[in-house]
Amino acid sequence: HLATSLPLPSERDHLRPRIDLVVFMIDIKSKYSLKNVETSLTHVDASFFLGKVCFLVTGVGRVNACSIETNAVCKLGEAYCSPVLFCELELEGIRATTAQRLLRMLQICAGHIPGVSALSFVSLMRKSDDD
Amino acid sequence: ENADPQKTAFLLRKAWTLYSVTPLYGFRRARLRDYARLLSAFIAAEKQKGLAVEVGVELDIKVALSSLAELRGSELDQAALLVQLSSRSRASSRNSEDKLVWSGWFCSVFGDDLSENVPEHFTCLPLFLTHGAESYTSLVGSWFQKTFDCCFRRLAISPLNLSWMVAMWAGCKLDRAASAVELVFSVPRLAQPLDISYAIHPEDAKALWDTVQKTPGEITQEEVDVFMDCLYAHFHRHFKIHLSAAKLVKVSTAVASAHCDGIVKILHSQYLPGVLMLLTELAISQIQ
């Protein structure tokens, strides 16, 4: 399901299937997309941040078109304990690989992979000097 | 930076195309006259080969290389190097003056990040600025690349860096009445390309920056973000357009203007070192 911002319209709540993974897409060329994501984050229930949220930064192939500091996005990922993936959608190979990664994450979040749960992502996020 | 305004006046109010240059190997300041001769011969030879620069009038290209000791940040920087190509038409009289057809200069203003890590025999002048026909730029560039084993790359300026520049320059204190602060945006993904020009009264822009900046002399990314967000919010309030979703391509202030393709114009001699320092930093990060 694709949405330009959150919250999702409440009229269709009863028709919507369970949400297993939320991917926030940030276009590195658009400051607006970052602001949009930051606002939408506030509408996500806290339980999602246990491995069911990830940030996907697109457009990283063009360094000279950056409108956002990558540091700012990484800090966002840290603040919400969620992984940040970087990709370039204009390159077919990377597009396919990224899609496969997201699909794999979705399978784990939906409980289709025995022995691995979404919580594994959170423990992978923790830095070694935290404990 | 006690740059003699007379000597550096030629830099102002010209559109300079920017390049980053890797360190030059085996460059010796004492040999400037030799280099000028060699470059002159190279250009003549290339023209013989048929890579004619100007069709029609036969032109002799004279090359002059000089050092600009004043154009540097600290003693650690190399003095700037100026290359000038002049022409004298063969048809005209001997007393006619040479016409400057192309100029380019290499410089380093507070480029310690690069120069402190460089081995012996290398000269660091990471920023190259040119004004004149592209064909001359590529001739001069080829000669330097062959002679000093260096590499030139066009220096593009990202929207992130352009917003840093407009925040810095809009906040500069100027005695005379200043021109408007202008930001030009290009809107992506439309059938017909659309450019939006956003002009702000310079006093309003400076007043806004003064409320944002906490420590004079210091600028943080957060402060630049707040400054830009205020401008975007103001525009959105009036026109319901999110400029933050468009691409910032050009910024113009009374101090200087810069275009994302790597073209700058410096308008005020007082801030010349500051602008060059910022550009040197961009050039160095492109090299590293």
Image (cartoon, coloured by chain):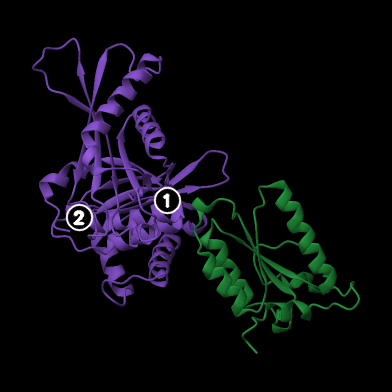
Chain colours: A green, B purple
**Residue at x 77%, y 62% (from the top left corner):** A101
Question: Where does the image place residue B58, in percent across and percent down from the top left?
Answer: 27, 12
Label disc, if present, on residue B178 of the rendered structure: 2
Residue mark closest to the camera, 2 vs 1:
1
Q: Is residue A56 left or right of residue B242?
A: right
Of the residues shown, which amino acid type is indicated by label 2?
A: Ala
Q: Earlier in the sequence, mark 2 or mark 1?
A: 1
Q: Secondary structure at mark 1?
A: loop
Question: Where does the image place residue B55, in percent across and percent down from the top left?
Answer: 34, 14
Q: Nearer the viewer, residue A98 or B80?
A: B80
Question: Where does the image place residue A121, in percent across and percent down from the top left?
Answer: 74, 76
Q: Residues within 10 Å of mark 2 (few under 14, many from 20)?
A: some
**Residue at x 20%, y 43% (from the top left corner):** B67
In the image, residue A113 sits, relative to residue B139, either above or below, namely: below
**Residue at x 73%, y 61% (from the top left corner):** A2
Label disc, if present, on residue B157 of the rendered structure: 1
Which chain is disc 1 placed on?
Answer: B
Residue B158 in view: no
Q: How many marks?
A: 2
Q: Residue furthest bottom?
A: A131
In the image, residue B110 sits, relative to residue A41, either above or below, namely: above
Q: Nearer the viewer, residue B114 or A75?
A: B114
In the image, residue A104 sits, relative to residue B127, either above or below, namely: below
Of the residues shown, which amino acid type is indicated by label 1?
A: Ile
Say which quadrant the N terminus of chain B sits in: bottom left
In the image, residue A66 sits, relative to residue A129, either above or below, namely: above
Question: Where does the image place residue A104, in percent across and percent down from the top left?
Answer: 82, 65
Q: Residues within 10 Å of mark 1 (few under 14, many from 20)?
A: many
Q: Secondary structure at mark 2?
A: loop
Label disc, if present, on residue B228 of the rendered structure: none
